[in-house]
Amino acid sequence: MIRVENLHRHFGGFRAVDGATLEIAPGSITGLVGPNGAGKSTLFNCVAGALPPTSGTVLMDGEDITGLPPHALFHKGLLRTFQIAHEFSSMSCRENLMMVPGEQSGETLWNAWFGRGRIRDEEAELLKKADEVLDFLTISHLKDERAGNLSGGQKKLLELGRTMMVDAKIVFLDEVGAGVNRTLLNTIGDAIRRLNEERGYTFCMIEHDMDFIGRLCDPVIVMAEGKVLAEGNIDQIKADERVIEAYLGTGLKNKETA
Ligand SMILES: Nc1ncnc2c1ncn2[C@@H]1O[C@H](COP(=O)(O)OP(=O)(O)O)[C@@H](O)[C@H]1O
Ligand SMILES: [Mg+2]
């Protein structure tokens, strides 16, 4: 579905992404892991339109989408999640789903989609859809809660929910599990799996928690120093000497031997 070919993104002389080549198969939940600073988020930003690549190509279903802005990708069904913007923290969860954020970090695309003069039928339709999404995510009881009052994990669920208000094909998730407690992490994992199985969403997710990755993702792609180092299922990745070496001193091996 997505093919990234020899992608580079340099910052001055520094090669944050240094010739990465990878594929994301349709229907997969592909994991992207690697030590801090490996270039994972930069790669995501290049693919999802937040940063222009220095060089290289991104294809979606064979079509060149390199450097397209977020709203153009959005209309192709390629989405990444955004943090709930500060201004929307006083709005309810339901309202956040119905009409989403403003200017920063490429979020204007939501306005392009939702901000058109709406007639009442469309609004009723949106309301219905928002309630279905809340139900799917098991947070119906929070529909009238202000987004600002949600826990970190509940916010992540709401962010995921926003991708469900449109017809997403592929969703990029950058550390959706960071700082989220076990119970909510499982809820988020279930939502991702169900979106994948029941709605055909393809996912590519950056995550540090290897257990979480292992339960959801196949394949797992490992990046280090701006390049793709290895790819395989979680067991292959964990057993790969090059991967262990790249992680040495940063957790994976330590955790396993603990
Ligand atoms: N806007 C930027 N300007 C300069 N350096 C950056 C910028 N964004 C990221 N970097 C650098 O690029 C490297 C890769 O960062 P990042 O893609 O965030 O890694 P990861 O997500 O794998 O932890 C890091 O060394 C980071 O400091
Ligand atoms: Mg990152």
Image (cartoon, rainbow, N blue to C red):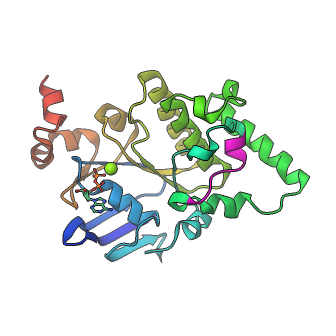
44 on left or right of 145:
left
| Residue placed most toward the observer, 13 or 231 | 13
Residue 50, above or below 171: below
* Residue located at (35% from left, 72% from top): 53
Image quarter where ligand 1 lies: bottom left
Instruction: State yes or no: residue 68 in magenta.
Output: no
Q: Residue at x 46, y 63 (%)?
A: 48
Residue 240 versus residue 65 in the image, above or below: above
Q: Position of residue 175 (x, y in %)?
A: 39, 43
Give the quadrant of residue 197.
top right
Q: Is residue 139 left or right of residue 3?
A: right
Q: Which residues are magenta?
A: 95-103
Residue 210 position within the rendered picture, expressed as x and y whole percent measured from the top left: 29, 35
Name the residue located 45 percent from the left edge and 29 percent from the top edge. 185
Task: Quadrant for residue 107, please give it.
Answer: bottom right
Q: Quadrant of the C terminus?
A: top left
Q: Quadrant of residue 76?
A: bottom right
